Amino acid sequence: MSAKYKDVLFGLYDDEVIMMNAIKKANAKHLDIMDVYSPFPIHGLDKLLGMDESRLHIVGFIFGLLGCLVGFLGMTWIFTSDWPTIFGGKPYWAIPAFIPVTFEMTVLFCGIGMTVVFYIICGMGFGVDNPVLHDRITDDKFCIAFQTNDMSDDGVDGLKGFFDETGAEEIHTKRI
């Protein structure tokens, strides 16, 4: 068996409340959850999994600030050095006239920058083949997955018992 593959045991749930209760039981039993999949965001799931708050908003602020500077300094350079033209008696450096372009550049840089960083962090770039555990996870099923590479048969049977005990509708094994 190659070390790059993961053996995954996962259970599918029909309801997010049942899955959240199963996660609480897994935390109480100190089980190491590999990942949880859901067709939509679930409030409070990140705290149950012990995840820290995302820092994506900091990246958004940095890209927004960069866009604001590019927009404002670009308009300043265009209208004071590159193409100084007086429009309707306004001065060359008319700051209120720069606000719409500066705002739009801020939104553009922030949106594109956050999207690129999100894709990089999540490993969803071009040419990346992300395995799918089960086709219905993104449709109407909720999933808790455990990695079972270094686990004994008794440990795997214990996880299957955990899924039965917590109300999983289906239990599957897959190598990804």
Image (spheres, rainbow, N blue to C red):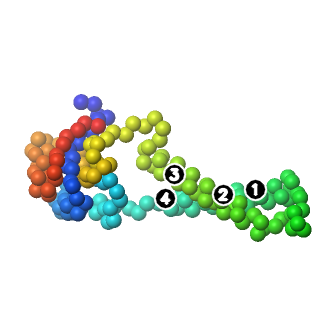
Q: Which residue bears the numbered disc 1?
A: 74
x 58%, y 57%: residue: 110
Query: Label for residue 56?
Result: 4
- Is 20 displayed left or right of 67 in the figure? left
* Cα distance in 3D space between marks 2 and 1: 10 Å
Query: Label for residue 5?
Result: none
Residue 80 percent coordinates (x, y)? 85, 59
Amino acid identity at mark 3: Thr
N-terminal-most mark, 4 or 1: 4
Q: Nearer the viewer, mark 3 or mark 4?
A: 3
* Cα distance in 3D space between marks 4 and 2: 19 Å
Q: Which residue bears the numbered disc 3?
A: 115
* Cα distance in 3D space between marks 3 and 4: 10 Å
Q: Which residue bears the numbered disc 2?
A: 105
Q: Secondary structure at mark 4?
A: helix
Amino acid identity at mark 1: Gly
Determine crowd level at label 3: few under 14, some 14-19, many 20+ residues with C-alpha closer than 10 A. Answer: some
x 29%, y 37%: residue: 176
**Quarter assignment of residue 7:** top left
